[in-house]
Every structure is written in C-alpha cells, then in structure tokens.
Image: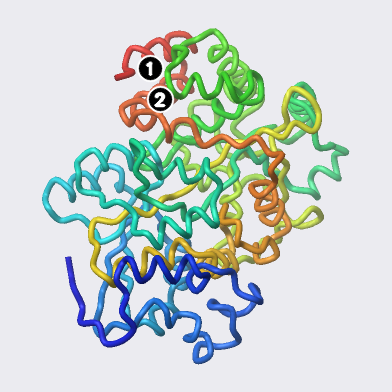
Amino acid sequence: MKHARRIAMPLGIVGVAALALTGCVGDAPADPSAEPGGTEGPAAGCEAYADYGTFEGAEVDVYGTILDAEADRLNESWAEFEDCTGIDVVYEGSSEFEAQINVRVQGGNPPDLAIFPQPGLLASVVGTGSVLEAPEAVQANAQEFWTEDWQNYGTVDGTFYAAPLMASVKGFVWYSPSVWEENGWEVPTTLDELDELTATVAESDVTPWCVGFGSGEATGWPGTDWIEDYVLRLHGPEVYDQWITHEIPFNDPMIVEAMDRVGELIKNPDYVNGGIGDVSTIANTDFGEAGLPVMDGECAMHHQASFYEGFWSDDNSVEVAEDGDVWAFILPGTEADASAVTGGGEFVGAFSDAEEVVAVQTYLSSAEWANSRVSLGGVISANSGLDPANASSPLLQSAVETLQDPETTFRFDGSDLMPGAVGSGTFWSGLIDWITGEETQSVLDQVESSWP
C-alpha cells in the first residue's frame, strides 16, 4: 500500500478517534444544504476538514460496484475533501467486484478500501485475514450515527470491520402518475388489493408489470428482492430471520407460498413483460432498463429499490413526484399500514492502516460525507446525521424518514446475508431457472441442497 509524507496535523488512529469522540469528526453540518463541509465555499469549507490532516501526494485506492453516473457522483462527493486534505481518492468500479475482490486479495493486490455491497461477502473476505479491524475513529462514528443493527452488518465474529455507507429501501413499486390518473387506478393498501389492481390493469391496453432480472455477472438478484419482500410481508420478521440463517430450510412451505405468490404476478403471461416481450425476457432484461417502459405507458408498475430513482434519466430531467413523471409506493403488507421493509447498503472495509487511508475511511463514515453524497441526488443513507431534506426528491426524503423511524421493521436484503454460495450463487441462478419455467418447489429444493 502507498504511504505519503504527512505535512501537518498528526492523524494517527488514536488521534482521529479522539477527535471523532469529541465531535470534531462526524458531526452534521450546521447547514446540511450548504456545500460539503457545511460552509458556503471550498476555501471556508477546508476548516471542516482540518482535523483529518493534510498530505502531500497521498493516494488512496477505493474499489467497489458503483458504476457510470453513480460513480461520477461518488467522486464528486469527496472532491472537496480531496482538495482540502491533499489526498487523491482514486475510485475503480467493477461489475465483477464480487469475484475480483477475492482474486485481488489472493494475489496480494487488494485495494486500500473496498465498498462491499453485501455483508455476506464482507464476512467471507474477512475470513481470509486480510481485512483490518475498523479504526477507533470509524467505530466512534458508527456508534454515533448508525443503529446497532446497521453496526452488526459490518461486524464479523464480534469484531467491527466496516461502517455502513449508502443505503436503500427496497420494495418500491414505481409507476406513472399521469397513466394511473387517466385510467382511474389507485395505490393499493394491501397485497390482496395489489393482486386485484394487477388483474384490472391487465384488462386495459397497459401491461401490469415490467420486470428484469439481468445484471451482468450478478444476474438474478432482482428476483431475490421480490421473494424477500413477500417472505417478510406474508410471514413476518421472525420467519424472515429464521430463513436467512437457515433455522428453517430454504424450501420451507412458507417460502414456497411466498414464491408462488410472486409467481402469480410475474410468471403470468397476461401480466408481463410490458414493452419488452414475454415472460422469458425477464431473465435477460437488465434491471436498469426494465422499468423504463413505465414512462411510455407500456407497463403500469416496476418493482425496484429507492436507488432506482437515479435510473430514470442521466441528467435528472425526469421529475420524481406524486404528480410528476414517475412516483412509487412501498409494496404493501397483508394489512393496511404495515411497516415492514427490506433494504440494502454498502460497507467500507480497509486493507491498509496508512494514515491517509484512515482519514478517508473516517470521512466516509461521517455525517458530513452522507450529507454531501445524498445532496448530489439518487441515493440515501441510514446515517442518523443525514438531513432528509438533502435527499433529491420527496420519495427519497420519505425513504430516509422510513430508515430513521424507530417504528419501522427493517430487514437487510436476505440474499446479501446468506452464505455467498447461496445468496449470490444458487439463489440467483435458481431464479433464472424459475422465471424460465422450472417449478417453485424444484428450485427451492435445489437451493436448499446447496446450503453449506
């Protein structure tokens, strides 16, 4: 790993921790809507970064799954930090991160920092002995700004390795308000009402659903979100927890019921795949493209997480609002006003304890960074120091409030918590078999037999 010459402000791990604990690192800006750092411009903003230290020619490599426009916004989110500290944060995104992070670790060439999209993958890489325990400053920020559950997702065998970064609320159903108003459709308040609405839409000139399970090397994961949402809503958080930890078998009758309930919607040729093709096209359609026919009125609904807001356009030209171009509602439960949701997030783990790496890792765990990134649009964070007003749309603001609401029953994406061989292996591939014709019981039996 690279080591740079420090030119001011000692920044050892203990020193950063002390600053974080006294509120110098990680406090939310007085005006979160201001420029990153909480001030009106870069020059004044550097005062907010003084405690991180300054470095001459320092470079920190960050590796993750974030690509394209989202990667551009990620780079923008730490630009002022770079200017003020002298650290060049070099981000590399890869659609093959899940496989390549292991290749790089085994080859002795890990990045300084990795943004893990799955707690299960983080745990498996921690098992190689290459990931370092989080510095005290990062632990302090995590304890201040995240719930115990979120901290636990970055903890392996009692040791805290990785603070959360961004987050998402899953289970949103996206739609076009103008199309719905024209047809007189109303947002359902229960799963039964959603079924009734789907049947009603099918009688019109609009196909009820557009769906895509495609995602490059990670093809299949969008299907797992459907199953997880239905397991949680039909059977509750206790069964959900038992399922993802294998206290009940993967092919338990309750899981069969949830999967069949999903199949009634997206395996029905009369209900999919609006603007794209027949049921079989779901397997190959990229999830990022799958929802776009909603805006053309070719399909009525698309099931995808809060982060999908960033996929409607590259230039934020699509208005996400209740009376805008697109809007969304949370997939309902068996009863009205159910508060259970699934979600996901990323976690930043370190392979180096160089002072400049600690500085970047600490900044990424702070409320300042969360407000900086969220204010750029398209994403949210579960960081309690985040001002919901910084979210780029009313929908994302509501998603932040959902994450911060103590009454919300939140469960992390199940496949991300399962052993990698299942969660990002047989579960993904099994859903491709399922959507192209294989029976529910057969698919679940195969996944169950693959559990380590």
**In the displayed structure image, the side of residue 278 where residue 122 appears, left or right:** left
Depth check, front residue: 120 or 187: 120
SS of the residue under disc 2:
helix
Q: How many marks?
A: 2
Q: Is residue 34 above or below residue 91?
A: below
SS of the residue under disc 1:
helix
> Which quarter shows the C terminus?
top left
Residue projecting furthest to the left? 107
Task: Say what amino acid the circle numbered 1 marks.
Answer: Val
Q: Are marks 1 and 2 in contact (CB under 8 Å)?
A: yes
Percent coordinates x, y for residue 179 in the rendering: 79, 45
**Which residue in the structure is indicated by mark 1?**
447
- Would you call the spot at circle 2 few (<14 residues within 10 Å), some (14-19), or many (20 or more)? many
Percent coordinates x, y for residue 255 in the rendering: 54, 15
**In the displayed structure image, the side of residue 70 where residue 205 appears, left or right:** right
**In the displayed structure image, the side of residue 365 where residue 356 appears, left or right:** left
**Which residue in the structure is indicated by mark 2?**
427
Depth check, front residue: 201 or 227: 227
Residue projecting furthest to the bottom? 43
Q: Residue 135 sits in which quadrant?
A: bottom left
Spatial CA span between label 1 and label 2: 6 Å
User: Which residue shows up at 26% across the image and 52% down it?
Assistant: 132
Percent coordinates x, y for residue 87 in the rendering: 32, 78
Depth check, front residue: 104 or 123: 123
User: Which residue shows up at 44% across the image and 50% down it?
Assistant: 346
Task: Say what amino acid the circle numbered 2 marks.
Answer: Phe
Nearer-N-terminus badge (1/2): 2
- Would you call the spot at circle 1 few (<14 residues within 10 Å), some (14-19), or many (20 or more)? many
Percent coordinates x, y for residue 252 in the rendering: 50, 9
The circle on residue 351 is none
> Which quarter shows the N terminus?
bottom left
- Residue 207 appears anywhere in the view: no
